[in-house]
Amino acid sequence: MKYEEIVNKFRYAEKKLILLDYDGTLVNLEPLPQNAIPSERLQNTLRKLINTKQTKVIILTGRTPHEIDKFIGNLPITIFAEHGALLKDRGEWKKQITDDGVWRNRIFSLMTQATFALPESFIEEKQYSLAWHYRNAESVNGYKLSRKLIHSAEKITVLNSLKIQDGNKIVEISAGEANKGKSVKYSIEQNEYDCILCIGDDKTDEDMFDALFGNIYGITIKVGGGKTSAKYRIETPEGVIHLLEQLCD
């Protein structure tokens, strides 16, 4: 894509907001989540953006607070973790939702059955969600089992107001209040921005794009292929970093 139009809008704006997903957007997707370590180039770029005049940078991720802090917690940056369930602002984590977790055992049981049926798949436990990963598993059977898991979980999710997030070789079931779109709306309300740049790669990031639909200051970018409501597209995280570097100039 051509960056010139986006860079010019950013440079001439008075108050700027940058909303960024992490996995698949700032770093490549990894077979094991713990291996998605940010490069020195990425960390330097984020640090420059944070220090750019009249610019607010926010990371919105499905990661747990512990995981994302391990990667970029050294930066003085605002972070929404677990799809918006928790917010880190000025170095302190705060809950953004309420959830009693009564649904967890039943969903965990379904995911355990899927894990036994598919070698190399695994369950990731978070505070407000459970995720079944099948990136490392046999592709065709992984997809078939993910459809079965989603179907089996539907009644539980409806009864407990949960959300099924059918992502990139991952099925995540989370508290219904946890939503990146909701976090985007909250962030916009904190100030009057005249440039809002939002970048993500997965189906969960479509909630962010939808939250900015019709916003005249919104610039939405999808990373990689697939159907999207974003206005622009970048092929790789490498391209995202290249764009962000230009915003620092």
Image (cartoon, rainbow, N blue to C red):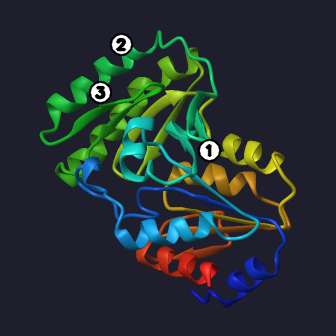
- Graded by Cα atoms within 10 Å as few (under 14), some (14 to 19) or many (20 or more), the crowding at tag 2 reads few
Q: Earlier in the sequence, mark 1 or mark 3?
A: 3
Residue pictured at 39% horizontal, 36% vertical: 66
In the rendering, at what x and y percent does residue 54 appear? 76, 66
Callout 3: helix, strand or loop? helix
Determine whether, in the image, residue 72 is placed left or right of residue 50: left
- The residue wearing badge 2 is 105
Q: Is residue 123 above or below residue 39?
A: above
- Who's the residue at 61% across and 18% down the image? 98
| Identity of the residue drawn at 62% across and 44% down | 180
Left or right of 184 in this view: 153 = left
Q: Nearer the viewer, residue 90 or 176?
A: 90
Look at the numbered discs 1 and 2 and tell me whether their residues touch, using CB distance below 8 Å: no
Query: Under tag 2, what secondary structure?
Result: helix
Residue wearing tag 1:
180
Q: Amino acid at mark 1?
A: Lys
In the rendered image, which residue does mark 3 sit on? 111
Q: Nearer the viewer, residue 167 or 31?
A: 31
Q: Position of residue 183 (x, y in %)?
A: 67, 42
What type is the residue that disc 2 sits on?
Answer: Asn
Q: How far apart in space, not on screen, are marks 1 and 3 (Cα)?
A: 24 Å
